[in-house]
Image (tube, rainbow, N blue to C red):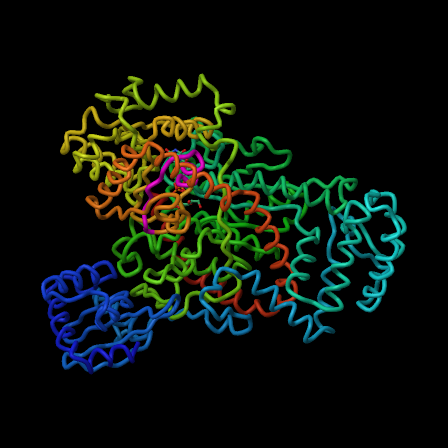
């Protein structure tokens, strides 16, 4: 970047830079984020009739993420490529110097009047040194492909240092048991040398048998050779597994390693932690804090159980009464508002052995712990919840789980506490990291603390993401963003929490712990509207009436003047970031949209007094104001209904029957399950360009991007689409079919679970071989937990006691 700055300074564009700086100086804001910078620059260009992207200055602006102004200097924060940052100070006389991370963080503190050097230095958190022992990916485009990298790394180790690594592999193979029954190898094989010899012998033995001969018929002979169940269910499967091991011993390569580890029967019991929300199978979706995560975890639990069963059968464990078990761990909510969230144990529908286990919070204060608690207030309860859950899980599993998966900040922190105590592999799933969702959430954390408690949330995030053995993200950009926007995990790399701590290196983005594994969509509930044979006519009629004509003011607002217009549909929780009000405003401001469409919203509740959530209450009021301001009576229906999965599937299909569209207008969306649901149903979908939808949709191929902060442009895009549909009646069908194809080819739960289990095995193996290297990191993390997180959580608890 330094070269580029000097190129600008040494060219005739130097005067442009001067004028641009003076333009910046005229702004009220001292801290400009990317969007502000682009706006100022574009105004500057039109004022001075400059060609934007082609100049050197234009290029420099392209890489600028933030600009901070103080009384004399400007600080430019550049992102020359994904996951990297360079910071420069530009003085009044246009001299340039690079500044360090420490200086940058001090500067940010100064900007919010929280820089007090006379009081001594602030605590600095630096996770960097702990990653020195572990391999790191070099090329940013390979970030998120951790397992491929790890396989390559491990197999090269096997190759370079066979003695040590084969010893590791041998010890690993001896480790596996199911309910006390030894698997894979027994005491007849005592050394890795013997292992290598016996494998060849066993291959010879099974090769002589009919390929489909069941394992049980030659189990005894294999046992004598040192092999226990777990290699396969037929002679040919056992042979295949042994041959892969043989090849791995002789000439290791990444594919062979992955193929072999993926076959090891080592995962039977899984915990999925999803603590804060209403976790249930009915009547919970759409409540504040309870959306996609619950859908995701439930679907994941079902498919995981199924996959574990299939794997156990293939491994030849059927006769051992192996019963894989998946437990979703959540909190029990005594005042459960008609849901089953007050039940300790609930079986997951359609499974044999997947359960929701709900553990109550300790009775610190019945006014709090008997009721639902917002995710922003949940922090004080997590440690004791983890301790109590540990006991319950051990009892339910009759032993330790093999894998613990956390969800969202709170679940990930509980997963860390459990994994640390039980010494089990920990996987994290963020779903949404609030840090990038709420602008300046770290810089102004102190002012926002009462409402959001970000100091706890971001500390918990740092703890859990660093402690996790592996992290799965739904998209690449969740980790490191796009060429011009910072990723969600990337935002934890370096930031200040003024007066609390500075993070100089919060996470190693190039660590192979990161893996992109997107979720799927429940194909029983959500399927193309054209599959008439699978649809129930009476349901269709009921949903049709509910959406367009039913008069029920208790849960539906608005009567349509012309119910036959195309529906412009959206469904989301009613929080600020989901921006349902933005969509209503976009519709209100565009007579042309109103001419072509009715706006149908399924969102939250209809009455302020029915909501217990601050943001939801604000949004309800705002939505009514917009309806009034733009006179939308007769053009909008707003449904405050709770739908079952089957019903919501039929909603999308009925909207598609009417050749409608789906709009997802969030200001930021981490992933966006409604987009998958709408697309698989066959709805042309317009989704926010901020976040995950950018990877789900391929613009103008199987859907469309919108910038929800630009209402006019959003309206224009939808109008352009509808006009095209009117000219060419087949256009709607083409986009609809492309949307369906996109989901079936890329977003299925089968793909997700196969990959997740393969990751769990490989990281389990890696963890086993590198355990001692992590202890110092985990000790550091524990210190943060006890010295920063816990006292702050305690303070909230004191406050809760007085509620
Ligand atoms: N949902 C629902 N009713 C509502 C709002 C949402 O059933 O009123 C469901 C929706 O079908 C989807 C999930 O909740 O399965 C929302 O997931 P998404 O990832 O889109 O957003 P999140 O709420 O997790 O931020
Ligand atoms: C949370 C969100 O905010 C959504 O973007 C995701 O789709 C959902 O969780 C499931 O991961």
Residue 413, horizontal then vertical, whole percent: 48, 53
Is 765 magenta? The answer is no
Nearest to the observer: residue 624 or residue 328: 624
Is residue 797 shown to the viewer in this render? no
Nearest to the observer: residue 158 or residue 319: 158
Left-right relation of 711 to 569: left
69 w.r.t. 790: above or below: below
Residue 320, horizontal then vertical, whole percent: 78, 42
Q: Quadrant of the C terminus?
A: top left
212 w.r.t. 561: above or below: below
Q: Quadrant of the N terminus?
A: bottom left
In terms of image quadrants, where is residue 571? top left
Nearest to the observer: residue 54 or residue 492: 54
At a point 42% along the width and 41% down the height, the residue shown is 738
Residue 649, horizontal then vertical, whole percent: 44, 30
Q: Ligand 1 quadrant?
A: top left
Q: Which residues are magenta?
A: 674-690
In terms of image quadrants, where is residue 6? bottom left
Nearest to the observer: residue 669 or residue 730: 730
Residue 37, horizontal then vertical, whole percent: 21, 63
At a point 53% along the width and 62% down the height, the residue shown is 146
Residue extending furthest front?
A: 728
């Amino acid at each position: 970047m330094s070269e580029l700055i000097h190129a600008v300074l040494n060219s005739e564009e130097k005067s442009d830079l001067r004028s641009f700086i003076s333009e910046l100086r005229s702004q009220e804001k001292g801290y400009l984020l990317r969007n502000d910078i682009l706006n100022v620059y574009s105004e500057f260009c039109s004022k001075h009739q400059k060609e934007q992207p082609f100049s050197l200055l234009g290029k420099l602006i392209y890489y600028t993420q933030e600009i901070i102004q103080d009384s004399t200097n400007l600080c430019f924060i550049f992102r020359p490529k994904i996951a990297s940052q360079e910071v420069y100070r530009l003085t009044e006389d246009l001299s340039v110097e690079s500044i360090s991370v420490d200086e940058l963080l001090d500067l940010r503190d100064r900007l919010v009047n929280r820089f007090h050097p006379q009081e001594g230095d602030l605590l600095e958190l630096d996770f960097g040194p702990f990653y020195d022992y572990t391999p790191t990916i070099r090329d940013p485009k390979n970030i998120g492909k951790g397992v491929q990298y790890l396989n390559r790394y491990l197999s090269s180790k096997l190759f370079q240092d066979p003695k040590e690594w084969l010893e590791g592999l041998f010890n690993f193979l001896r480790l596996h048991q199911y309910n006390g029954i030894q698997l894979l190898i027994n005491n007849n094989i005592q050394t890795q040398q013997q292992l290598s010899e016996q494998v060849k012998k066993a291959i010879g033995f099974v090769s002589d048998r009919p390929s489909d001969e069941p394992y049980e018929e030659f189990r005894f002979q294999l046992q004598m050779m040192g092999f226990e169940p777990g290699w396969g269910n037929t002679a040919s499967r056992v042979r295949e597994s042994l041959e892969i091991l043989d090849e791995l011993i002789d000439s290791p390569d990444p594919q062979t390693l992955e193929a072999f580890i993926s076959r090891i029967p080592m995962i039977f019991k899984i915990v999925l932690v999803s603590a804060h929300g209403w976790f249930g199978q009915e009547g919970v979706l759409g409540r504040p804090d309870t959306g996609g995560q619950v859908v995701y975890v439930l679907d994941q639990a079902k498919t995981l159980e199924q996959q574990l069963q299939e794997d156990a059968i293939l491994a030849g464990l059927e006769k051992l009464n192996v019963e894989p078990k998946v437990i979703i761990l959540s909190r029990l909510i005594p005042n459960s508002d008609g849901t089953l969230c007050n039940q300790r144990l609930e079986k997951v529908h359609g499974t044999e052995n997947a359960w929701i286990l709900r553990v109550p919070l300790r009775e610190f204060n019945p006014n709090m712990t008997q009721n639902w608690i917002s995710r922003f207030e949940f922090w004080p309860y997590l440690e004791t919840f983890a301790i109590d859950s540990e006991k319950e899980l051990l009892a339910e599993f009759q032993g330790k789980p093999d894998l613990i998966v956390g969800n969202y900040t709170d679940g990930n922190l509980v997963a860390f506490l459990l994994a640390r105590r039980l010494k089990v592999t920990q996987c994290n799933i963020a779903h949404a990291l609030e840090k990038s969702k709420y602008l300046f959430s770290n810089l102004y954390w102190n002012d926002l603390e009462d409402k959001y408690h970000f100091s706890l949330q971001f500390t918990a995030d740092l703890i859990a993401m660093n402690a996790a053995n592996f992290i799965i993200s739904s998209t690449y950009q969740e980790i490191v963003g796009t060429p011009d926007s910072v990723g969600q995990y990337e935002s934890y790399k370096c930031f200040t929490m003024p007066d609390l701590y500075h993070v100089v290196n919060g996470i190693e983005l190039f660590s192979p712990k990161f893996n992109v594994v997107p979720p799927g969509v429940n194909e029983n509930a959500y399927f193309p509207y054209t599959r008439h044979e699978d649809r129930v006519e009476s349901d269709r009629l009921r949903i049709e009436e509910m959406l367009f004509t039913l008069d029920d003011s208790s849960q539906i607002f608005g009567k349509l003047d012309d119910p036959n217009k195309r529906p412009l549909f959206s469904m989301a929780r009613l929080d600020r970031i989901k921006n349902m009000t933005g969509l209503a405003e976009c519709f209100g401001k565009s007579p042309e949209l109103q001419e072509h469409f009715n706006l149908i919203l399924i969102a939250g509740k209809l009455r302020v007094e029915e909501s217990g959530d601050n943001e939801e209450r604000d949004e309800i009021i705002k939505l009514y104001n917009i309806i009034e301001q733009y006179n939308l009576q007769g053009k909008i229906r707003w449904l405050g209904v709770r739908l079952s999965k089957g019903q919501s599937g039929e909603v999308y299909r009925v909207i598609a029957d009417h050749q409608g569209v789906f709009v997802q207008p969030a200001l930021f969306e981490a992933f966006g399950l409604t987009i998958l649901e709408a697309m698989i149903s066959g709805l042309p979908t317009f989704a926010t360009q901020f976040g995950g939808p950018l990877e789900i949709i391929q613009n103008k191929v199987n859907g469309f991007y919108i910038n929800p902060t630009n209402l006019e442009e959003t309206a224009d895009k939808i109008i352009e689409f509808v006009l095209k549909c009117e000219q060419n009646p087949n256009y709607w069908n083409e986009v609809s079919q492309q949307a369906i194809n996109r989901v079936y080819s890329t977003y299925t739960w089968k793909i997700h679970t196969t990959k997740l289990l393969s990751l769990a095995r490989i990281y389990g193996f890696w963890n086993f071989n590198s355990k001692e290297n992590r202890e110092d990191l985990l000790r550091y993390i524990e210190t943060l937990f006890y010295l920063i997180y816990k006292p702050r959580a305690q303070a909230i608890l004191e406050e809760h006691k007085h509620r």
